[in-house]
Amino acid sequence: MVPLEISDPPSSHEEEDSHSCASWTSFAVLPKSVPSGRFRRQPGAHRALLALSCINMLNIADRYVPSAVKPLIQAELQLDDAQSSYPAVAMTVVFMTTALFFGICADKELVDRRILLAGGIAFWSLATALAGLATNLWQLIFFRALVGVGEAAFATVASPMIADYYPAHERNRSYTIFNLAAPLGGALGFGAGSMLGKFWGWRYAFLACGVPGILVAFSVLLLEDPEKGINDACESQGDSKDSADSEVEQKDESSSSDSEDGSAEEVKHRNSCITMRNLFREIVALFANPYFMLSTAGMVGVQFAIGGLSEWYPTFLQRYDGLGLGTAGMVLAGGCVIGGIGGTVLGAKVAESAARRIGSQAYFLVPAVFMVPGAALCMLCINITGHSAVAIVCLILGMVCFFTFQGPIATLSMSVIPARSRARGSSLQILLLHVLGDVVSPPIIGMISDATGSLKTALQVTWVAILMAGMLWFCGYFLPPPPMSVGLDKADSGHLMDVLRPVSPEVSRQP
């Protein structure tokens, strides 16, 4: 497939291929003339990043509340280890399947992205609160499955929207700030959930964590919605081509409607076939993109480990170290704050610094290197029992290491996907992360625990998954440099918090 060219117009065959965005190498090409407002931070970016990051924190907190109060749920509903993981599995299965629908809605602009966000946030928050009213396993599974619908809308739309707000050289830092919400949300979910569960019961934990999301959901309607692809070179080059493609499609539709056998139904069917063909080509192009696939495959390994640890490690601390419910929850909360924030910031800073020296391969190399000590420390925190202080220190240091992937890999994943199909690419990534990651890890660990009578034995799969993630990203380092910008703008100091400063008033989004 031929990369986009600047000078000569493409042939009809090249137009068809580039329209499907299959040429991932085209992202390295910058246009000769840059329209005003392109390739720079968009108005309202800092407000949007703060709002989306705070909402992401509530999203992660809602996800981890059940793990914090798992023993209480098991005791009241009389569930074994395998059964207690079914609500989490239901949530992630629904999450990954509905993500594809929301990705198409966002990419095709069928619904305003802000409406999708607001509706999703309100829906998952309400479902979280309603889970506190469940009286049996099936009701709990149903309400947790509904949480997956709302979270899919948010996760599918938020990451591509951030890519439209920020140019390529600022995305590593913007995604770092967005992903800092993950450890903070995990700490909030484990800490608040365990303490509320201890003093008030697990039902109040669900109610307390669901209500705030309902209150803040509609704040996203006040955000700016940047033009899709405004900060991507291939999209700016493709504007005129898209118009030409649109005219060709309109002519095709007219000729079809004027033909002897042409009817409205036939034209509709033909256009539907074209849309499905283009969608299929985009999915094939994503699977053929080695940067996207290696990024995603490594994330699957980490997601497998995080899903298993977050679901079972509080229970592990209670069974093997004798910690109480509240203490175990606070340990995980502290680990999420220290390890998650430290690792996320460390990974972003080291990757960005290394990228200026060795190029964009650093976004693969840095997290790959950190996964090795991360896997070793994870192994120690599982196998050291009877010395809870040592195990907790190993857990926190391990979190620092394997949370380093968040900024670099998120930046890499979004920057090598065409903007016009970025939401669908994000939804495909969500599908793979969950169907191969945290959907399967909690029940696998639960079944191994039931079969062997040892939760310690079952948790060994987590550090192996982290080590495999590092090996996959290390393979990515040997590919040609990913086609993405790593340089700094002249006015950009490179500090993490620079992405939160307001944009200059003269910046315009209009070409």
Image: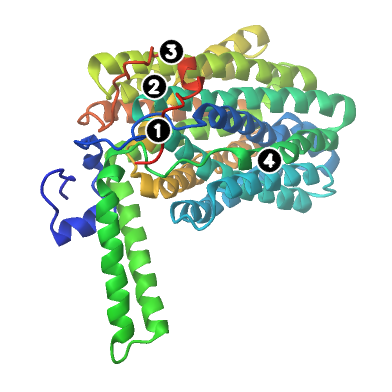
Q: Secondary structure at mark 3?
A: loop
- Residue situated in front as seen by the camera: 382 or 226: 226
Residue underneath mark 2: 367
Residue underneath mark 3: 495
Between the C-alphas of marks 1 and 2, the distance is 10 Å
Q: Earlier in the sequence, mark 3 or mark 4?
A: 4
Among the 4 quarters of the image, the one containing residue 184: top right
Q: Secondary structure at mark 4?
A: helix
Between the C-alphas of marks 1 and 4, the distance is 32 Å
Residue 241 circle label: none
Between the C-alphas of marks 1 and 3, the distance is 27 Å
Q: Secondary structure at mark 2?
A: helix
Q: Position of residue 222 (x, y in %)?
A: 62, 39
Residue 385 shown left or right of residue 468 in the figure: right
Q: Position of residue 404 (x, y in %)?
A: 45, 20
What amino acid type should be assigned to the residue bearing mark 1?
Gly
For image coordinates 66% across by 36% down, the residue present is 63
Residue underneath mark 4: 217
User: Crowding at label 1, few (<14), some or many (≥20) Cα neighbours within 10 Å?
Assistant: many
Between the C-alphas of marks 4 and 2, the distance is 33 Å
Q: Earlier in the sequence, mark 1 or mark 4?
A: 4
What amino acid type should be assigned to the residue bearing mark 4?
Ala
What colour-coding does the image apply?
Answer: rainbow
Residue 26 shown left or right of residue 232 in the figure: left
Q: Are marks 1 and 4 in contact (CB under 8 Å)?
A: no
Q: Earlier in the sequence, mark 4 or mark 2?
A: 4
Q: Position of residue 331 (x, y in %)?
A: 69, 16
Residue 157 shown left or right of residue 362 in the figure: right
